[in-house]
Image (cartoon, rainbow, N blue to C red):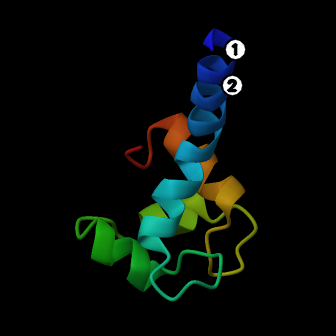
Amino acid sequence: MKSILATAAAVLALAAPSWAQNAMDTDGDGYVSMEELQTAYPDMTADNFAAMDTDADGLLSEEEVQAAQDSGALPS
């Protein structure tokens, strides 16, 4: 029983960043746009977004969202 609970806890811990992105990804395309980010965090600016958008494609990928959360640029 303990191993099942430990496994479930590990899976949930790893899935948490995806849940955060999914909450922001309102159109379900797998990315977070500037508009979606500002809907979730109205105080975010274009400069904030550009700093998080490390590949400069105009969208935040799951990896970029995670990196922004890890650095404290984006609340987790």
Q: Which residue is mark 2?
A: 7
Image position, residue 64 (x, y; %): 65, 57
Callout 1 environment at 10 Å: few (<14), some (14 to 19), or many (20+)?
few
Q: Are the residues flagged by discs 1 and 2 in contact, CB closer than 8 Å?
A: yes
> Which of the image's four quarters has the N terminus?
top right
Q: Quadrant of residue 29?
A: bottom right
- In this rendering, would 63 be left or right of 35? right
Identify the amino acid type marked 1: Ser
Q: Is residue 66 above or below residue 10?
A: below
Image position, residue 26 (x, y; %): 45, 82
Callout 2 environment at 10 Å: few (<14), some (14 to 19), or many (20+)?
few
How many marks on residues? 2
> Which of the image's four quarters has the C terminus?
top left
Could you tell me how far apart the alpha carbons at marks 1 and 2 are, in whole angstroms? Answer: 6 Å
Residue 57 - label: none
Residue at x-position 62% and y-position 76% = 31
**Secondary structure type for disc 1:** helix
Give whichever of 16, 73 is nearer the camera: 16
Give whichever of 25, 15 is nearer the camera: 15
Residue 3 - label: 1
Residue 42 in sight in this render:
yes
> For the view shown, which residue lies furthest in the front direction?
1
- In this rendering, would 11 be left or right of 52? right
- In this rendering, would 46 be left or right of 27? left
Image position, residue 66 (x, y; %): 60, 48
